Image (tube, helix red, strand yellow):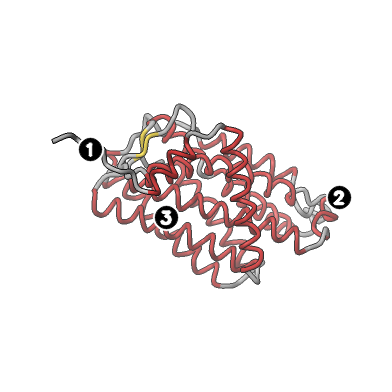
Amino acid sequence: MGNKRETPTPMKQLTRWVWRRSVREKVTMGTVITLVLLILLKVMVKKNSHLFVATQLAHCAGILVLIYKLSITKTCSGLSLKTQELTVIYLIMRIICHFTLVQDVGIVLDFLTLGSTLWVIYMIRYKLKTTYLQNLDNMPLYYVLVSCAIVSAIGHPAWQINFFGNQFEFVRRYFYVYNLTIEALSMLPQLRLIQNAKMVEPFTAHYVFALGVARFFSFTNWIIMLIDSKGALLTQIGKGRLYLVVAPLFEVIQTFILADFCYYYVKSVMEGRRMMRLPSLV
């Protein structure tokens, strides 16, 4: 009896076809898919707040994956403690801004995410610290915090406010921009750890993919806001509100970084591989 090769499934055939395309063709296909998704979301989503909630729900889904991983597998291997700490920092700032700027269902999701993230940090620091890959989680936090602080100072939305006359308003708006920039870059330590490890176990991959989806929703929210304002938001840039440039720019950078990871994630899922392997750069 001769050995017959297993006929690849349509998904595997599609994956192989995409993989054989040139870099230019892959970029073109990715751009077209992104534009189609943006158009669909623009048509389907009636309120920008819905996209914000979708972003938070995607993040919550990622946190639930982490809770399952830490509770069942009893290991935090592959997780970045520094990304979790950055998440806590920007969530606290956003909750402060929610109390003073916006009060809706988003604040409930933020509290749930904050509590869950604090639990994840506790597990990594104390209960499962022997499985924490500290030597691979080597991106200093001050790289993100200091750079975001400088950018937030430049893009402060209310320099016209007299600091000595209204310190609270000045600081509140600074926190608003600061949490946006930290959130947009909070995944960098996790991506650096993945880059160092060159291999990602399933639950960590699911978590990062969920955050990639969250970043896409957040990026889409900014794009739709700019479109719906019919240029009104852009006119605010000339009035010193540079955060309208800074925040979307950071979102674009983070979205494209995570898009590369999501590509390899989908490729691994389609090929039925349990462990996700990455090239030299994420």
Residue position marked by numbered label 2 in the rendering: 238
Instruction: Relative to 277, say whether 182 is above or below.
Output: below
> Which quadrant: the N terminus?
top left
- Specify the amino acid type for callout 1: Lys
Q: 25 or 244: which is nearer to us?
A: 25
**Res 170 label:** none
Q: Quadrant of residue 176?
A: bottom right
Which numbered disc, 3 or 2, marks the residue that appears first in the sequence?
3
Can you identify the residue that label 3 sits on?
Answer: 62
Q: CA distance from mark 1 to mark 2?
A: 67 Å
- Name the residue that disc number 1 marks: 4
Residue 197 found in image quarter = top left
Badge 2 crowding class, 10 Å Cα cut-off, few under 14, some 14 to 19, many 20 or more, is few
Q: The residue tagged with tag 1: helix, strand or loop?
A: loop
Residue pictured at 45% horizontal, 49% vertical: 209
Query: Looking at the picture, does residue 66 appear above or below residue 132?
Result: below
Q: Amino acid at mark 2?
A: Gly
- In x, y percent, where is residue 109? 49, 66
Which of the pair 217/53 is nearer the observer? 217
Q: Residue at x 38, y 46 (%)?
A: 270
Q: Residue at x 78, y 53 (%)?
A: 163
Q: Would you say residue 190 is visible in this rendering?
A: no
Q: Is residue 108 left or right of residue 13?
A: right
